[in-house]
Each structure stands twice: as structure tokens, then as C-alpha cells.
Amino acid sequence: MAAHRCNIFMLVFVLCGLTYVFVRADIEDTNHVKDAESVAVDIAPKANIGASLRSTKTEDQTQAAEEERQWEATEVKEADRVPDTMQTPDVPPLTPAKDQFQEELVIRPLHSGDIYASFQFRTMWDTDFLRGSKVSHYRLFPKSLGQVISKFSVRELHISFTQGYWRTMQWGQPFLPSPPGAELWVWFQDTVTDVDGAWKELTNVLSGIFCASLNFIDSTNTVQPSASFKPLGLGNVTDQRFLRYAVLPREIVCTENLTPWKKLLPCGSKAGLAVLMKSEKLFHSSFHSQALHFRPVCQDWKCKSTVWELRQTLNVVFDLHTSGQGKREWSLFKMFSRTVTEACPLASSSKVYVDVTDNPQGELFELSPTTPLLSQAVVLGDRRTYSVYDLTNQATFGQTRSLNMLLRWRAAESGDMLRPLLHGERYVAGYGLQTGEIHTLMYNNHPYRAFPVLLLDTVPWYLRLYIHTLTVTSKGRDNKPSYIHYQPSKDRLRPHLLEMLVQLPPNSVTEVTMQFERALLKWTEYTPDPNHGFYVGSSVISALVPSVVAMDTNSTRECPLFSSFFPCKEESSYFMRVYTEPLLVNLPTPDFSMPYNVICLTCTVVAVGYGSLYNLLTRTFQVEEPSPGLAKRLANIIRRLRGVPLL
Amino acid sequence: IRFTLLFNHYCLLILAKAGQFFSSGHTNNWAVLVCTSRFWFNYRHVANTLSVYRSVKRLGIPDSHIVLMLADDMACNHRNPKPATVFSHKNMELNVYGDDVEVDYRGYEVTVENFLRVLTGRLPPSTPRSKRLLSDDHSNILIYLTGTSRWNGFLKFQDSEEISNVELADAFEQMWTKRRYNELLFIIDTCQGASMYERFYSPNLMALASSQVGEDSLSHQPDLAIGVHLMDRYTFYLLEFLEDIHPASTANMNDLFKVCPKSQCVSTPGHRTDLFLRDPGNVLITDFFGSVRKVEITMETINLTAPMVPVSELKTESQSYVDQLPVAEIIHQKPKQRDWHPPDGFILGLWTLILLVFFKTYGAKHLKHIF
């Protein structure tokens, strides 16, 4: 007992000594000192060993912190705010930063009472992923993505995760369209020799980065479009062999996809506009879409050199009625349950745009706090006016140090919405589980202009399309497409690919119909819930739509991010993509308990049938006399002895 | 002199004890948390797994060391009246889904094959790191399984396949022979859970189950707004117990065995420690649920050079954006050159047949007309 107590005492003594030594060592860090001291008071042996561990850890932490401070000193170039703990740098002047980051948020009230918020984060980086020398110094550009891009020689990467369907007729056109589920399309560099192998590995790596089941993308749902999905970035290589497109309509989007997406931003979700992205509010909406677009763009208007652009966009439409209250009033707090308190310090520009085109004199709704900045932009073929809040300017935040925009509607009537010029619908017709028909409708709402659209359809192999039944009709008459590319499916290898260039007459509906037959899958190929049905991905309608207002082809001016996504070549039309609904078809589903039933039945039949047959064939009947009584048996014995016939 | 001798003696003892602490056991922690059931009415299984995930993260295991497998999505399910949330109790105070969750295997990916591949490490080469269990022989692994199993000896995965206790025991043996774990804690919350650990035979395994063979594990309480049962009893009381644990806690395994007695759980939780080398009373809860970081101090200095100045780029001629819908080009597009494949077996057979018939009818002497 005494030994035990002495043991503790010695331990305390030794560790006090150690702690004293460490306290002397890190004299500047008061936090760590307090920690070590408070822990040394504890006398339980295990905890003390833990304390020695922790004090060693703090030593290491201080060292690491000092090293970090040194690193930060060399790093600081054009930060908007100088951190307080920075020491005076005494390093030689460096080249100007090669990357920049911009963020913006656009808020557009919709005519149905809902509100559409679109976040765009753009990182531009002047570096060379292509050359052999590996890029190892990442500043604003996310390292996980940069390594993937250089490893797989990716030229363009577009990935989107969407929950919900964009209702074009009620909400107008989105800034960046996306189909329900997950969509991934990639242009590889022309130096890649095995595009399919690189595609397979890339989808696996991306599934790990985004926590999505993108590893289900394989040859059965990948296609190589021949005319759609031309590169959105710079370059002149358009050999479609390097393009791969896949869509997973069943993919669910939830917080686990948002978390790694937010981690790719330079400020994370800690500063700037990204603090507004709280999953509980974002997923309680009618439409939620997060996307990532990577492509090479021009550095400036001269376009002599290329920079790599990474855009992360998040589009969300909040429903008026699910957010509670009947009043038509929207604010940042009501939408996101947060307000903006500062701009991201790493951003060169941070702005919030509110669409006030329908509200020139403030008669429709009232916007507070007011801002003097107004900006006009031509987006989606229309000239819109926006009130701009510049978050890099401290005055925007006012007295409360936070920005909470409030839009309060005055009038009940909202007026007419500009009808979207192009609109698509798709549905399955027919009855029964054998055949069906896919109908795709494309509406051209322009009063007098016709324009061409490219329709891309990817149908899984288990819906066997009969292409001879393909009909395209507009206004009751046959409309022959000027270009058709059809690649038939191979069972379990390849889906159907149908691409058509159709000229849509003005003010008309064009209907494309195709008949199909449903295949019976092998019983191991069914999902665990086959009665839900199987999804067919959305059709993509790409079009050059005539615009109401002259588009801005001049890229010299600084234009907001949301209007500069699709490159604009001519003034009279702009490029647009519309996605139709995905289809849900039921395949003939077997009863999965049948193997058990069959085994039982077969065994019973075999046992009963074979058993009876065997008996019939091999059984012989013998007559057997009942055994006689005792007296008769004795009499028979005597008779046998006498040699007389038995009884 | 006697005092100094005593002092030296006790210093050595202390050092020996400290040495033992540092040399025994593990250097890193991993967790594999699996929910095996699908469909909205199995909300409680997802809530079970997420509550263990939450505790494990809170106690220090980072996402890169957790393999989380959820067979269905409850948070963003369209039936969920509060999207992006999964609650553990009907007063809705604890959202176990949280804001920072990373699910590694979800939906249809949660299969018996994937689970066993994760455990044994035999994954295809293109599997990303977040989906792998990269443990070594100094790793302590926590494995938590929850789901339904109607009979004893197996656990159902997504209502379409099952994993038996023999398969699980063999997987752990594979892990042991490959030195993939130092110590392993296996917790299962399902009906007749004790049957799942009956067949284990590898060393250093400790197992806990929510019910004995022949008993059903029951759920805790339903929520009228959500409409389903929110959590199972065993995991509910386990979560309550773990909420009181912090990274420096000294609670040991004996406290964990006492979680959820029959009065609260209705079923009798069981545990198995005969394969475990250490005494459970000496095993800290944080040995499995928390994360140990061993720190090495170095006195070396590292020279950090200034970042490399990139070589000046070659000035290329000005490029332009590609035309998105080049109508004229599309219409006059040549059919793309497909790679030439040698003729298929069927075509070869057909041609052979034709040639054979030809030469049979006309005789071989006509060959000279060809050659």
C-alpha cells in the first residue's frame, strides 16, 4: 500500500518536472500553458500519462503553428484583410497571384410566388495541368480536384446533382440547367489513349470525392454523343471520341453530397456567401441542384492565353407555401436561416444580385436595405436589371454588421411572365408490361421564328426501342429531321443513343414518338426494390434560341458570372439546354419466392410420382395366411411327422 | 542513500508502466458502420447507425477513418417531413444526421459482397480511398451492424440477401491472418443478435449484441409526425451512454456491458469476451470509439523554399470558343470511323458454310479460276 502511494507521489513529481520544462519552452502560448497546468493537477495515473502526451502534443502544436506562421508570411500577396497574427514578412517580392476567386448570389423572385436563388463560385487559375511537371502548389483551387484532373488528363468536367425537376412553364429558364439525378460529362485531352479506362477510373474517384454512387456509371449507361455536348471551353478539338456522357436518374442528393462540395470552396462554409448554405433549408425546397464545371477559358478579352476555370453552382427554388406563412415575403433569413456577415477574404469580388426588372419603380415589391448600385445584364435572351450589393464594401453591412435582404410584396397581382421560348415534356404511353411508347414533346413558343434543336435520348438496353416506329410530327405533318444518329443497344453492354436535329416551326408542338418493348431481366439483375420501377434518364434538348434582345458578344466588359456561362458567338441567338422529365417504367417483375416454390413443388412431385411408379413396377403381392392357433400348430407338427397333408 | 535507491526503483517502475502503455495496443482507430435495411419503415436502423457515427466522430475518429454504409436515404426521402434531418428521439432535439456527414456506401452499394470486400480489403483497384478500410496491424476497429434478421444465424441485407454468422467469422479470420486489426469490437443491434457472434474464432475480438438467441430486439418509440419508429432501444441507450463520454474519459468496457439492462431494453443484451486478450475492465471505451494520436517530436529543421515561379507560357495563337450547335457542320457530318473489329463468329461461320457449299457443288477444280 505504501509502495502504491509512493508510486503515485513519484509519478506526480516526475510529471510536474516535465510539465515545468514544457511550460518554460512555450512561454508565448498562454492557452497551452493553462491546459498543461490544469491537467497536471489531476492525480489519476492514467490521466497523467495522458497529460504528458498532451503536453508533448502542445509542444508539437506550437512548433507546427510557428512553421505555419512562417508559411503564411510567404503566402500573403493580395489578401483583402491582413490576419492579426501575421509577422512582418521578410521574403523577396513574389510574382502576382495566378489564381482568383469570385462569388456571387443571384436572387430572382418567380411569378408563382417562389424564389430562385443561384450561387456561383468561380476560381480561375493560370497553371498548366498538361505538362509533365506536376502541379503541387495549390492555393485557391481545390487540391483533390486538381490531382484528379491532372491524373486523368481531363479537359472539361461537368457534374451536377439535382433533386427535383425544373418547371420551365412556371419558373422560366434556369441559369444553368440540370437533369434530375446525377449527370456527368467529360471531355478528355487528345493525349489520352484509353478513354474508356480513364472514364471508369474517373467515375470511381469522383464517387469517392462526392460521396455519390457514381461507380454505377459503366458501359450500360455511358454514351458518346456525336453532336450534342460540344466543349464549353476553349479549344478546337471536337473529336467526339474523347467525350463521355452518363446520367444516373435515380441518384439521391442529400447533405452527404453537399458537405464535400462545400469543402472544395476556398473559404469552405466559414466565410462569404457559403455560410448561407445550410442543408436543412436547402433540401426543404422544390428544386435543389449543385454542380461543378471545369473548363479552360480565355484569361482576358484578347484571348491569348488560357486559364482554367472551376465554377461551382448551387441553384435552389424555395416554395412559398412550405416555408410557412401565407404572406408573400422573402428574406435571406427566411430562405437560409442565416444572414451574410462578411465576404470571403480570399474573394476578389463578392456580390449579391436581386432581380428587380419587374419592379422598376418599386410598385410590385419593396426591397430593403436599399442599394444605389444597379446593373443591367443580358441573360437568357432578355435584358434584366439587378440591384447589386457589394459585400467587399463594409458599408453594405450597415450598423448590424450583417446583410439580410428583405423583399416584401405589395400588390397581389404579379403580372404575366415572359413565356419561355423552348420547353420540353416526355411521358410513357401504352398499357401493360410488354410494350409501350415514349412521347417527347418540344414546344416552340416563338410567334414567328423557327429554330433548330438537337434532341439527345439515352434509353437503357432493357427497353428495346423499335426505331422503325420513330415518327416526328409538327402541326400534324411529318417533320423529317435533318440529321439522325442512332446507335442501337447491346444487351447488358450499351444503351440506345438517339440524336436528331429537328427544325421546330414557329408557335408549334413537335412530337417524337417511339415504340418499345420491355425486356425480362435475369433474376440477379433486379434491384432490391424492383417494384419501384426503373428510371430512364432525361432527354436533352440543345437549341440556339432567337433572343429578344441583342446578346453581348463583346467579352471585354466585366459581366456577372451568371450571364457568362454559355459562350456567345452571335448576337441574335443564344444557346440553351432544356431537360425533360425522367421516365419511370415498370419492368415485368418476377416473384422472387418462386425458386423456393419450384424446389418444393418439384421435390413433392418427384417423391410422389417416382415413388408410386417404382412401387407399381417392383412391388409383388404375396398371399399370407394368418398364423394358426396353438392347437392347430401342434396338430400340424404331428401331421408332418406322420407325413400326412397339413391342415 | 536508501531514499535515492527507492526513488530510482520507483522511477523505473513508472517508466516501465509508461512503456507498457505506449507499446501495448493500437496507433489508429477505424470504424465500419453499416445499416442494412432499406425502405421508409426501417428509419430506425439508419438512425441507429447515424447515432453511432455521430458519437464516433465526436470522440475523434475522422471521416477518412470511418466507412459508413447506409442502405437507404432517410434524410432526403420524400416522406420525411423535415428534410435533411434524422432524429433519434421524438422531441426532435438531436439531429443525428448533422451538417457534416459523409456516407461512403449508399443505396444499392450496400451489399454483402461490398461489406466483406471492405473488411478483407479485396477491392477493385479503382476504389477510392474513402471507401476502403486501410487498417493495419495496430488498428483498433469498431464494427457496428444493424438491420433485421428474422431467424437466428444471419442478418438480412436490403431484404434481398443475407450474411450468415459463419461468413462473418471467416471474414474476421481473414482479417486476422492478414494482420488487418489489432483489436476489434463488434456491436450488432438486431433480433437474435447473439447468434451472429457465436461462431467467431479469431483472437482479439469482443462482441456485443442487443438480444440473445430467441429474443427480438425492440424499437424505442414512434414519432407521430414522421410516422415511424425512430430508434431501437439498445442503440438509444447506447447513444445516451456515449453522449456522456468525452475523449479523455476513463470509462471502460464493463460500463458498456451494463448499457440497457433488461428493464429498459426488454431483450437481454449479450456480450462475448473470451477471445479478447486483455481484461475488459482495462479496455477504455475511447480505445474503440475515440481516436488515439501518437505524437512524435522532432528537433530537425525543415527549409521551406519560396514557391516555384512557373515557366513563362508559350504564347499560342488566340483561340476561340467552340460553336455549341453548328447546324451546317452537323448536317454534313461524315459517319465517324469506327474501329475495325475482326468478323464475329457468326459471320465467319456463315461464310465458311457458303464456301463449303460452293465448292461441294462445283468441285475443287474451279479453285484454279480463283488462284
Image (cartoon, grey):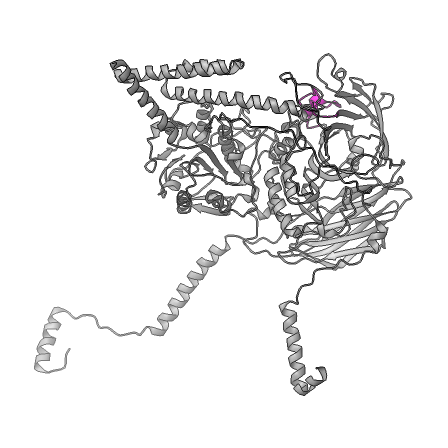
On the image, the x and y values in percent for residue A253 come to 63, 37
On the image, the x and y values in percent for residue B124 come to 54, 48
Q: Is residue A345 part of the magenta span, yes or no? A: yes
Which quarter of the image is occupied by the C terminus of chain A?
Answer: bottom left
Nearer to me, B85 or A500: A500
Question: Image height check: is A108 above or below A573?
Answer: above
The residue sitting at the top extreme is A399
Q: Is residue B118 part of the magenta span, yes or no? A: no
On the image, the x and y values in percent for residue A312 come to 70, 34
On the image, the x and y values in percent for residue A74 come to 65, 24
Question: Image height check: is A593 above or below B355?
Answer: above
What residue range appears in magenta?
A: A321-349
Question: Residue, x 46% and y 40% (percent of image)?
Answer: B148
Type of secondary structure dominating the magenta stretch: loop
Q: Is residue B363 visible?
A: no
Q: How many marks?
A: 0
Q: Is residue B97 visible?
A: yes
Nearer to me, A507 or A262: A262
Residue B339, quarter of the rendered image: bottom right
Residue A642, quarter of the rendered image: bottom left
